[in-house]
Image (tube, rainbow, N blue to C red):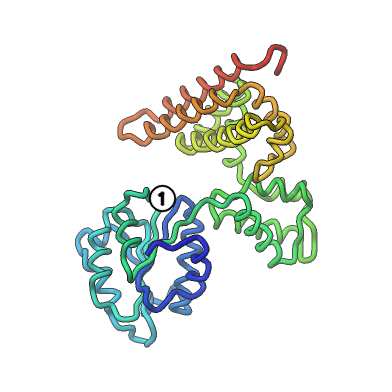
Amino acid sequence: MKLKSNEIAGFIRRPPDSVGAVLIYGADGGQVREVSDRIGKTIVEDLSDPFQVADLTPEVLKDEPSRIADEAAAISLTGGRRLVRLRGATDTVTAAAELALNAETGDSMIIVEAGALEARSKLRKLFETSKSAAAIPCYLDSGAGLDAVIRETLSAFDVRATPDSHAYMMEHLGGDRRVTRSELEKLALYVGKGGEASLEDTQSMVGDSSALALDQIAIAVASGDITAADRLLRRGYADGLNPVGVLRAAIRHFQRLHRAAAHIAAGENADQAVQRLRPPIFFAVKPAFMAQLRSWPIQRLRLALTRLSEAETLCKSTGTPDLSVAGQTLLGLAYSAARGRPRGAR
């Protein structure tokens, strides 16, 4: 079955007895694992118990496609329900998953964890159309969702955050749920129970260097700072940044510019348009963002997003020199931004 957004939280808390298999998928691997763990713990107390939990990988299924069904049908030596977890799934496991859904597996629960799956994915369709299975999408935390994760995690440690500290977290977290919680827990332990996290505390404790590097590259590109963009790209590649990750960071930044430009096209002024963005623009970045809005009319932003998306697709093609493709696309956009800057602007 395909769960509606308002049904997911209740399902995770207490999966119905009629559902014996769940597909959890999405680009946020940390959230996929978190949801999987929460559902798993409704079935067994200890997720590491080898008598009640079977952990499988797609490689195992190549030679034993019936393995999911066999493990789910096995009887626990210590009593209680059995949990079967398949991690790193792709469409290649669809046949094995279908065997399991059609087999008699008693009261066992099968959890399949996967990355981002397109709407036409065979595995996703299998779970969405089955009456005895369910599919749960995990989208990257942003906006109200990310805000809730931040407040919930800090509250558990009895820690508050100043408004500018919270804004910084909204800007630099959300790419992976497990990383987000880990960074917040680190901050909470640093501040101490009952304390308040200042901007300085947050800047020193939250966000890894790679995330900051991605932000810096995107800002340099959109600002038309060709020299800085080239330098940051070279340094980022040397430090191990993935070209696809760099392109996605640029896409996220240009999408925010496009949303603000759309508000301006609808009659709002630039300040009003930027204030509507969620999460809010971090105050230290706001001047550059406002200048970028003046350099990028909405039509050119659409073209920029198309170029970035095409470059990402090309980088994923076998044999493509992804470093070159990403670099040429990003520096080309930086050059375009430099030409489009109002005279006298920097």
Q: Residue at x 44, y 33 (%)?
A: 309
Q: Residue at x 60, y 55 (%)?
A: 145
Quarter of the rendering occupied by the N terminus: bottom left
Would you say 160 lies left or right of 119 here? right
Whether 139 is drawn above or below 248: the answer is: below
- Horizontally, residue 184 falls left or right of residue 86, namely right
Residue sticking out furthest to the top: 343
Q: Is residue 214 visible?
A: no
Secondary structure category for the residue under label 1: loop
Q: Nearer the viewer, residue 126 or 82?
A: 126
**Residue 322 visible in the displayed image:** yes
At x 55% / y 57%, what residue is drawn?
178
Q: Position of residue 223 (x, y in %)?
A: 63, 24
- Residue 290 in percent (x, y) is at 70, 29
Q: Please determine whether, in this image, residue 222 is positioned above or below residue 18.
A: above
**Which residue in the rendered view is the most extreme toward the left?**
63
**Of the residues shown, which amino acid type is indicated by label 1?**
Ala
Label 1 sits on residue: 116
Q: Check disc 1: other Cα within 10 Å, few if <14, some if 14-19, many if 20+.
A: some
Locate residue 87: give its quadrant: bottom left
Residue 195 position, x and y percent, is 80, 61
Q: Is residue 292 above or below residue 48?
A: above
In which quadrant of the rendered view does residue 217 lie?
Answer: top right
Tally of numbered tags = 1
The quarter of the image holding the C terminus is top right
Of 269 and 52, which appears nearest the observer? 269
Residue 335 x %, y %: 55, 17
Viewer-side residue, 28 vs 1: 1
Residue at screen point 21% across, 63% down: 65
Left or right position of 139 against 261: left
Left or right of 316 on screen, residue 213: right
